[in-house]
Structures are given as structure tokens and as C-alpha cells.
Amino acid sequence: MKKSILFASVVCLILLAVVCSAGCVTEEKNYDGQNLLVYSGAGLKGPMAEIGTTFGEKYNVNVELTYGGSGVLISQMTTTKLGDIFIPGGEPDYQNAVAKGLVSEDYQPVAYHVPVIAVSKGNPKGIETVEDLATPGLRVALGDVNATAIGKASAAIFKKAGILESIEQNVVLRGATINEVVTALSTGNADAAVLTLDSANKDLFTTIEIPVKDNSILITPIGVTTFTTKPELAQLFADYVASDEGKAIFEKYGFPAYPDAKYT
């Protein structure tokens, strides 16, 4: 009798181990080298490149990332109707893609794009506020309003400050990506720029915070395209980016993770 009970117990333990093992296999499902095409805002290149690698290794997937200004990416999606994921710099660009029928209305917030004023190291022009960017003779680099999330955010900030029109006289560049704005400032072709917290390299620039009440803080969203041929895999990728693991990678590159009471 005791031997029968012992045998039954061993069998139960073996079955339990098999079930647990099966569960692990399901969680770490192998997608046999399938491809995912991800449209990513140019300013998200650091964290998204690392996430593409970690996700690809975890699930045996080839993650192809296409970077660009959100306006350019939306044009590409409209023309090709190819791809699986869209992650722009801010919600307005995502909503634009929703309106065009390119992406699902359901999306997940990932991190914050926090606009800051960036100036040459040491702040030789003595910039302290957004209003100072309208000082006559100052050279200002901005993101393109129609192509970049930071361009749209900058316009909203200037409108709040009442300098939307006067600042135009100082604009020397409107970059198609935030990286072009960074280059203009770092090469001395501009005295000041509106960048995001993550892109304002503190080794190169001095940054001036814009108070939250005066700012136009962006939330970076991620969602699945309406024409993906791999909806399960695409959703898995979106979930991974919006998970604690994905957000930790964004934080590593200087993005405050969503949610954060400071920026709510």
C-alpha cells in the first residue's frame, strides 16, 4: 500500500513538472525566425534598437526597425500598407495614423518625451526661459511641425508663451528629425534648440527645464498596424515594449517611464 502511494506521488510530481515545463515553452514561444517590421520615431532609436535585439533573441524573431520623422513614417505606411508596429514620439502622431486607418485605436503608453531648452555648454547667451528664445538675433533650431513630435510640442509651448509668431524670426533650422536639430546645435549652427530630455546630451549641452505647466510633454505610444499579417506576434512585441522590462530599457536611455507623477 505504501509503495502504491509513493509511486502515485512520484507520478504526480512528474506530471506537474511536465505541465510547468509546457507552460514555460508557451511563454517563450519560438516564432521560427519570422520577421517583424517596426516603424519607430527617429528619437527612439537608442531604446528601440536594444529592444529589437532582446525581443528577437527571446522569441527567435527578426525585428526590422525603420526610423524617421513620424510624418515620413505615416507616409510610408500609407503608401506601402506593409509593417506591423508603429511607435512615434508622441500621441498626436499616433492619433493621426488612427485617423488614416493605419493603426489600431488601442495603444499602450510607454514613456515620456519631455521637451527642454538646450543651449551651448555654459549657456553663453544667458537663456533662462522659453520667452528668451524670441530674443532678437538668437539662432534657434526646431523640429519640423509637420514631420516631428518635438516640432508639434515646440509649437504648443510657444503658443502657451505667446511667442509663436515672434520666434519665427529666429528659426534657422526646422529638422525633419530631432537628430538634425541636435546636429545643428552641436556644430554651432544654432544658439539654442528645443530638444527632448533624452536627446539633450549633457556632455555637449546645458539644458534648461521648462516648467510642467508651461510645457507640452509627450507620451510615447505603441500600437499594431491594421494591415499586419502577424497580429499575434505584433501584439506580443507591443506588450513587450510596454512591459516593465521594455520600460526599463527606455529609462536606461534617459526616457522617464510611463506613468510618472511628475509629468502627469
Image (spheres, helix red, strand yellow):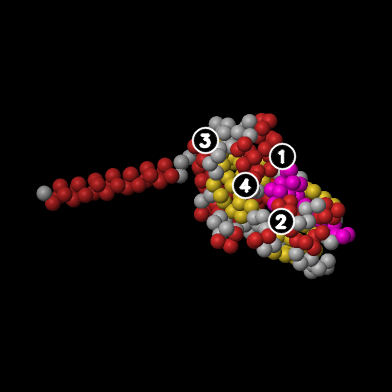
> Does the segment drawn in magenta span residue 151?
yes
- The amino acid type, in three-letter code, at marker 2 is Lys
Residue at which label 1 appears: 72
Q: Horizontal and vertical percent for residue 158?
A: 74, 55
Q: CA distance from mark 4 to mark 2?
A: 19 Å
Image disc number at residue 160: 2
Q: Earlier in the sequence, mark 1 or mark 2?
A: 1
Q: Earlier in the sequence, mark 2 or mark 3?
A: 2
Residue at which label 4 appears: 91
Residue at which label 3 appears: 231
Relative to 173, residue 26 above or below: above
Quarter holding the C terminus is bottom right
In front here: 16 or 173? 173
Asked whether disc 4 touches disc 2, contact meaning CB atoms under 8 Å apart, the reply is no
Residue 70 relative to residue 62: left or right: right
Outermost left residue:
1
